[in-house]
Image: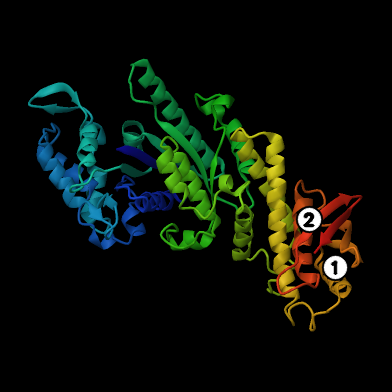
């Protein structure tokens, strides 16, 4: 059984939502998941799965009843009775492989009494038959009980929802965890909490090594959450390092010891407000689902088979996107997100080709840098990276151009009456794009040689690293529909690009 702890120094970072989606992902690949709600002050796991009304007792009640019956000298060594108690608390989610051990019934006033009266330290060294120095660990015993707490099923993953607040958070972080997912916002408090957790886990791992413990140290996965959609990994990492460098004097961490990489969970206000899940819906076009899949891949990175199954749940990820036929989908998901946020609408709220040019330019700039950083980190040759990204942007631009082309040849969409002559279509298209702010372009057409030359005197993607490749693809996609041909789009082939002139041949 693997134990994964989702932890946050502050609340409101989307920790429980991420944990719930992780459980859903594991369920989709037929893994048995037991969720322990350790956020005793604000238990929310049952709410996420809409089973709050089924909660009667939980882990807090279990601990309280043990203390209430046996007092300060805990002798509750009957593991069968403890197992029965815990099993009675567990709730199964419908017919799924997801089980919840709740903290307790938060609607019951006794729950808050139990929470405030527990002395958690007393559970670490408790007496057995009067032997006060036995040093038996109550919580370690519970972990062994939980492994077999499901009827006729073995728990594959114990997932713990844990928010910091007092010393109670130390128990699952230091005692239970194989891996800790630390979620934090990109602000002073958030980065402080990440460094605090990083420092504590580092000290714990050092102690384990010193005493020769064979079990591997706890792995920390730093995850910046509720990140603005315009933030790339490189941007977020820079912000994180700027905050962290100002705080290192509070911790036993050097500048080399802070996170070298971050995972991002971008904001999605609709889902955050509704506190709704995403991986149990057909919402794979949302950027958020891709962020979750990437995080889950990292959590499960030591099991290649499981990781590949998790990867298959995503719409497409950057590793699949670059270099494969469907690579354009990776870029399109960013466009879909911007449309959902309303950033690709004009002032008249009409969606058309006149998108906000600065939005598109910034998006392409950030995306190119983000992909490049990922691939370099994966050890891929820089020349290979450049070639693949160029092709990817060209393909994405082509899809965008085809979209305009289809609209243009539909009567009433771009022109009241669609021109029949190629030159008239091209002039109308270039005028449309100039009005949209794309740039000042002209063209030459030789219908005998079937050559079209577009002269890019200036354009709005000038200065972006891969912007011109997106533009080349866009021109190719538009021309495949505007040049008269058969019922199907005509084939367009690039011939050359020199002195701002794009030369294309068509069938």
Quadrant including the N terminus: top left
Q: Give me the residue at 42% from left, 47% from top.
A: 309
Residue 127 seen anywhere in this rendered image of the structure: yes
**Whether residue 82 is situated above or below residue 483 in the rendered picture:** above
Residue 499 numbered tag: none
Percent from the top left, x then y, of residue 296? 45, 45
The residue closer to the viewer here, 468 or 2, is 468
Task: Indicate the secondary structure of the residue bearing disc 2.
Answer: helix
The residue closer to the viewer here, 501 or 209, is 501
The residue closer to the viewer here, 329 or 371, is 329
The residue closer to the viewer here, 246 or 20, is 20
Q: Is 52 on the left-hand or right-hand side of 480?
A: left
Percent from the top left, x then y, of residue 68? 13, 42
Q: Is 341 on the left-hand or right-hand side of 182?
A: right
Q: Is 112 on the left-hand or right-hand side of 392?
A: left
Residue 165 seen anywhere in this rendered image of the structure: no
Q: Give me the residue at 21% from left, 37% from top.
A: 142
How far apart are the alpha carbons under marks 2 and 1?
14 Å
What residue did someone put label 1 on?
Answer: 430
What residue did someone put label 2 on?
Answer: 472
Percent from the top left, x then y, of residue 33? 31, 47
Percent from the top left, x then y, of residue 75? 11, 33
**Whether residue 376 is situated above or below residue 32 in the rendered picture:** above
Task: Indicate the secondary structure of the residue bearing disc 1.
Answer: helix
């Amino acid at each position: 059984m693997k134990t994964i702890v989702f932890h946050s120094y502050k609340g409101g970072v989307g920790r429980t939502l991420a944990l719930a989606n992780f459980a859903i992902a594991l369920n989709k690949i037929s893994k048995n998941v037991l969720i322990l709600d350790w956020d005793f002050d604000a238990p929310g796991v049952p709410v996420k799965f809409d089973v709050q009304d089924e909660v009667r007792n939980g882990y807090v009640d279990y601990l309280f009843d043990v203390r209430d019956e046996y007092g300060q000298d805990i002798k509750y060594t009957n593991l069968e009775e403890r197992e029965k108690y815990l099993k009675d608390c567990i709730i199964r989610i419908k017919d799924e492989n997801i089980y919840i051990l709740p903290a307790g019934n938060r609607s019951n006033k006794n729950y808050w009494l139990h929470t405030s009266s527990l002395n958690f330290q007393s559970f670490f060294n408790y007496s057995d038959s009067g032997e006060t120095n036995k040093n038996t660990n109550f919580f370690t015993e519970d972990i062994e009980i939980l492994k077999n707490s499901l009827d006729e099923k073995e728990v594959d993953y114990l997932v713990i929802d844990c928010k910091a607040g007092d010393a109670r958070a130390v128990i699952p972080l230091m005692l239970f965890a194989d891996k800790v997912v630390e979620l934090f916002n990109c602000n002073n408090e958030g980065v402080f909490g990440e460094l605090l957790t990083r420092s504590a886990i580092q000290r714990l791992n050092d102690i384990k090594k010193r005493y020769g413990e064979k079990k591997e140290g706890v792995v920390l996965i730093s995850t910046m959450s509720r990140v603005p959609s315009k933030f790339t990994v490189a941007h977020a990492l820079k912000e994180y390092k700027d905050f962290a460098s100002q705080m290192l004097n509070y911790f036993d961490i050097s500048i080399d010891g802070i996170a070298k990489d971050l995972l991002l969970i971008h904001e999605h206000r609709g889902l955050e407000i509704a506190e709704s899940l995403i991986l149990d819906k057909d919402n794979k076009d949302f950027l958020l689902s891709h962020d979750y899949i990437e995080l889950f891949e990292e959590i499960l990175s030591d099991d290649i088979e499981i990781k590949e199954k998790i990867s298959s749940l995503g719409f497409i990820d950057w590793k699949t996107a670059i270099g494969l036929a469907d690579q354009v989908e990776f870029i399109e998901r960013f466009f879909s997100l911007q449309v959902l946020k309303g950033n690709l609408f004009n002032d008249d709220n009409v969606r058309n080709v006149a998108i906000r040019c600065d939005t598109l330019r910034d998006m392409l700039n950030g995306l190119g840098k983000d992909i490049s950083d990922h691939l370099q980190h994966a050890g891929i040759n820089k020349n290979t990276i450049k070639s693949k990204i160029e092709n990817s942007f060209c393909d994405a631009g082509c899809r965008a151009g085809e979209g305009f082309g289809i609209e243009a040849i539909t009567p009433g969409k771009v022109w009241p009456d669609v021109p029949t002559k190629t030159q008239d279509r091209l002039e109308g298209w270039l005028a449309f794009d100039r009005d949209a702010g794309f740039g000042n372009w002209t063209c030459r057409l030789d219908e005998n040689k079937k050559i079209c030359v577009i002269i890019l005197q200036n354009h709005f993607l000038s200065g972006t690293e891969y912007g011109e490749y997106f533009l080349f693809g866009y021109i190719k996609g538009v021309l495949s529909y505007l040049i008269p041909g058969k019922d199907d789009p005509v084939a367009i082939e690039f011939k050359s690009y020199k002195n701002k002139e794009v030369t294309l041949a068509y069938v």
